[in-house]
Amino acid sequence: MRHPHYDYTLDEALALARSIKYGPLPLPSDPTPGIPEAIEIVGKSLRTCGFNWITGRVALELLRKANSEEVAWS
C-alpha cells in the first residue's frame, strides 16, 4: 500500500514504528509491531513531537487506512 500523495509505503510506516519502539538501530530479532500497535506508537510520537512532523502524519494515515479506518488524505 502506498500513500496517494507522498512517496511512502505501509512497510516504511511499520519500519518507522519499529524504530521508534526499539531505537534507531533495532536488533534483527526485534519484531515489527502490528498495525494497531504501530498506530499507537506513531500517534503518540506525533502528538508529543512539538513540530509539524510530515513523515509521522503520512505514516499514521497509511496505518489507519490499513486498519480499515476512514482517512482524509493530506
Image (cartoon, rainbow, N blue to C red):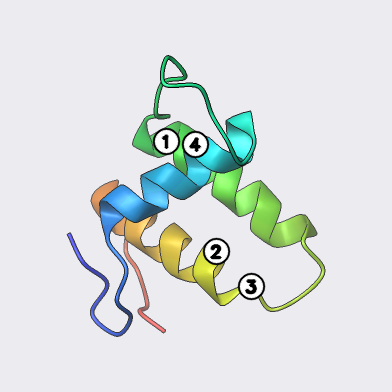
Mark 4 vs mark 2, CA separation in Å: 13 Å
Task: Please give the name of the residue rendered at 64% of the width and 35% of the height, measured from the top-left corner.
Answer: 23
Q: Label 1 to label 3, Cα distance in Å?
A: 20 Å
Q: Answer yes or no: do the residues labelled 4 and 2 have beta carbons within 8 Å?
A: no
Identify the residue under disc 2.
56
The answer to whether residue 68 is visible is no
Q: Residue visible at 61% across and 41% down?
A: 24
Q: Do the residues labelled 3 and 4 touch (CB within 8 Å)?
A: no
Q: How far apart are marks 3 and 4 (CA)?
A: 17 Å
Q: In which quarter of the image is residue 28?
A: top left
Three-letter amino acid code at disc 1?
Pro
- Between the C-alphas of marks 1 and 4, the distance is 13 Å
10 Å crowding of disc 2: few (<14), some (14-19), many (20+)? many
Give me the disc on residue 18. 4
Q: In which quarter of the image is the N terminus?
A: bottom left
Residue indicated by mark 1: 36
Q: Is residue 17 visible?
A: yes
Q: Are the two marked residues, 3 and 2, in contact with CB atoms closer than 8 angstroms?
A: yes
Between tags 2 and 1, which lies in front?
Answer: 2
Q: Would you say the residues marked 2 and 1 are in contact, meaning their CB atoms lie under 8 Å apart?
A: no
Q: Position of residue 16 (x, y in %)?
A: 48, 49
Q: Quadrant of the C terminus?
A: bottom left
**Mark closer to the chain start, 2 or 1:** 1
What is the three-letter code of the residue carrying label 4?
Arg
> In the picture provided, is 72 more to the left or to the right than 26?
left
Q: What residue type is labelled 3?
A: Trp
Which residue is at the far top?
Answer: 29
Q: Residues within 10 Å of mark 3 (few under 14, many from 20)?
A: few
**Who's the residue at 33% across and 80% down the image?**
6
In front: mark 1 or mark 4? 4
